[in-house]
Image (tube, coloured by chain):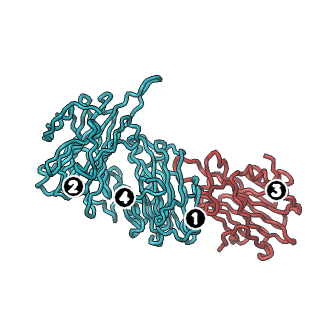
Amino acid sequence: MELSLTKGQKADITKNNSSYRNLLVGMGWQSGAGVDVDFSAFLLRADGKVAGDRDLIFYGNPKGAGGAVEIAGSDKRTLAGKTDQEQVKVSLYDIPRDIERLSFTLTIYEGEARKQSFANVDDAYIRILDEGTGREILRYELGKNFSVETAIVVGDLYRYNGEWKFNAIGSGYSGGLGALCASFGIEVKADAPTPPQTSPQAAPKAAAPPPPPAPPERTTAPVNLSKISLTKRGDVINLQKGTGSLGEIVVNLNWNQKKTTGFFGRSSGVDLDVGCLFELKNGMKGSVQALGNSFGDFARAPYISLDGDDRTGSIKTGENLRINGNKVSEIKRIVVYAYIYQGVTNWAEADGVVTIKQSGGPDIEVRMDEHNNRMGMCAIAMIENVNDQTFSIRRLVQYFSGHRQLDETYDWGLRWVQGSK
Amino acid sequence: MAVNLSKGQKVDLTKSNPGLTQIAVGLGWDVNKYDGGSQFDLDATAFCLNAAGKVNSEKDFIFYNNRSNSNGSIVSSGDNQSGVGAGDDETIKVNLAAVPADTQKVAFCITIHDAAQRNQNFGQVANAYVRVMNEATGAELIRYDLGEDFSVETAVVVGELYRHNGEWKFSAVGSGYQVGLAGLCNDFGVQT
């Protein structure tokens, strides 16, 4: 039976069980549509500050403490019957002596701007597992005691008298990741997102691929906490090439389901669906979408699958298209689109956002922030093969009356008939 | 260098520290650095107990509204509600030689004000400690890091000063409670 902690509680990790050497720190949460929660960990010295920017472990810097602390990414394990959203591997005895404390934190991306706080996040927890046995050592569920916080310190692993302990913190700041960074001694660059690659890619197959986004300077420059946003039509970025394989690429569609209902009224929300047209190297073409029940296949052609259909927006993670990045060499191009299946064509209210997630690289975000309410379909991004090595992603955000018009615009050549799901 | 209190430990005060007549119990903590929570207000209190382990009167309960015992031998520095600043935030001074004869024990307690309403406990208070000093020399005799040994508690009986064969000894009680100051008052016979 694992130990369940309350806010403020401290617990021994290694004192009573010296076999705990390699831990997994798992975290999870449920956030409403459009609430973007990020994980990060700070490696702190005795003065409660980081030694340098490299001690902030986050999506842009997944490994630290000489490799003793590492975000598990796609190696996440399902343990004690639960899959964590984030898992961090911690090798306690490989952590350099000058690191006294690991602070595990959650932040809401652009929480202030979007008027969101941890009051919008449910069921957040942290748990510590023994990597060897998979046993859950302790867990802390944060509950609902947040109001203005957009950044919270969930819990700390720390040294005390030569042992490692854990402290359930559950407190935070209203200033987002920036405030957290300030409290831990990291200078944050204000309002300077990574400039997106703006050079349009005229001939993607022949031209040299545009350079990957410059990794943030880790020595002197302030940390840039922005994700990469493709903001202009035609912006192109390449997915980062990791050590060999691209892994799974998740295209997530999320939208706000505003409950603008009267007392007896029904929700007049929209049903937004994500889908794509694909073209493989072998000439195979088709679509993956809920309409017509074409859910695709991840392991076999077209190497793209759709998670399921979220008709209400109530599934908090939205809808996901998964692209098998290991099959990049077999995929020629993919155009990702969203369409309104039911409800009023009101893109402004839907406030849709597509996030393209890759293991080991920054999330790439495309917001549907130009609206055309006469059209029910929006092409979001073109994903194209670059030298069979990686994909380039180009922002489209262009509206169409339907599949046929979109198909013609991008010269796909499929035949279209009316369908329903 | 002070010893970190070991729970249950009993130490001679006047016997091993000849000439020790004045002790001071100091309490310190840091302000809440987080947004969205309440400030911490810690209180140092002392209960002057008779042989039965109860107070004789309300005068024997030294706290923010009653800053000294009946003859002024045990005095509180007063109520610091914020914890702002370095060093001890509250102290209780004891003139050992002048403590009334019917006071057999003095129990020193640390409590968090309004802990239940503010959803606070010692684990959330940064750098909360209590220490016992020789007031004449300023030497620290005993120190307790409250946040490390206690976390879910809201009231701690740090230790008891008690008479033994004509000397004063100190017992490191180190009992934590989740009942706050009102619960402690109940235990020691103070009507609240």
Q: Secondary structure at mark 1?
A: strand
Marks 3/2: CA–CA distance: 81 Å
Q: Are marks 3 and 2 on the same chain?
A: no
The C terminus of chain A - image quarter: top left
B186 left or right, relative to A311:
right
Identify the residue at horizontal 77%, vertical 60% (top origin).
B107
Residue A73, which numbered label?
4
Residue A398, located in which quarter of the rendered image?
top left
Residue A328's disc is: 2
Q: Is residue A369 visible?
A: no
User: Nearer the observer, disc 2 or disc 4?
Assistant: 2
Secondary structure type for disc 2: helix
Which chain does tag 3 point to?
B
Q: CA distance from mark 2 to mark 4?
A: 20 Å
Q: Colour of chain A?
A: cyan
The residue marked by circle 2 belongs to what chain? A
The quadrant in which residue B18 appears is bottom right
Q: Earlier in the sequence, mark 2 or mark 4?
A: 4
Q: Is residue A317 left or right of residue A142?
A: left
Q: Amino acid at mark 4?
A: Gly
Residue at mark 1:
A12
> Disc 2 residue type?
Val
Residue nearest the viewer, comparing A115 with B176: B176
Q: Regarding mark 3 in the picture, which secondary structure is present there?
A: loop
Say whether marks 3 and 4 touch (CB < 8 Å): no
Chain B painted colour:
red
